[in-house]
Image (tube, rainbow, N blue to C red):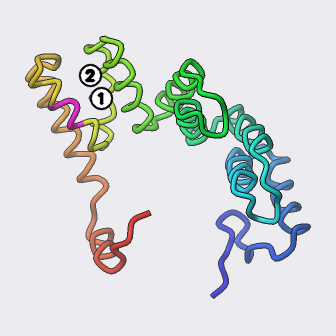
Amino acid sequence: MKQWCAFCRLPFPRTSGEFTKRYNNRMKVKDAEAFRMLGKCYLDGGGFVKKSINKAIELWNRAVELGSIGVHYYLATAYVEGRYVGRNPTIALHHFKMAAIGGHEKARYYLGLFEYDNGNHHRAMKHFMIAARSGYDDALKEVGMGYKAGHVTKDDYASTLRAYKESQDEMSSEQRTKAEMEFPFKD
């Protein structure tokens, strides 16, 4: 069965020239997702390009300039772990903040961890509550522990639980449940 490109609705390219042409067309119109995907290709050495971490980081930085929230998160974790780039907590924190502002709940969760580790419990709990209200499970656990430790009021905890449940209800559907039962594999 042929795989199709989600953007151009054509079969995946078979030659390096076709691959390059498609990405160049998308990059000309400043498509942040094209920069992200091509960066991933350079990172892995896939998609007819030679592996180049420097080129991948360059493309990801361009995607960030174009507003890619996911790439902010990728770069943040890379700078935290020292993967592909040198460890730099300051740059990582910047990318986590930008991703969180854009609505990336896992980045918001990591900001909470950072603040908690630095003794800013009240600020950490605010980050955790925002992430939990978006439906992020680990953040809800942190809010629960914060409640037990006295960092979160009963009202804040209750409203966070309600918002978390509403978020979960919005994401659940009969079709999704059926699909999960048919295809139980997660990525």
In this view, the residue farthest toward the right is: 17
Using the rendered view, name the quadrant where residue 105 is placed. top left
Tag 1: amino acid? Phe
Question: Residue at 22% across / 45% down in the picture?
Answer: 166
Q: Is residue 164 magenta?
A: no
Residue in view at x 80 percent, y 43 percent: 55
Tell me where the magenta segment starts and ends, as one range: 140-144
Q: Amino acid at mark 2?
A: Met
Circles 2 and 1 in contact, beta carbons < 8 Å: yes
Q: Main secondary structure of the magenta part?
A: helix
Q: CA distance from mark 2 to mark 1?
A: 5 Å
State whether residue 31 is above or below residue 186.
above
| 17 or 133: nearer the viewer | 17
Q: Residue furthest bottom?
A: 1
Q: Is residue 21 left or right of residue 178?
A: right
> Please, is residue 181 above or below residue 100 in the view?
below
Read off the residue under disc 2. 125
* In this rendering, position of residue 81 left or right of residue 40: left
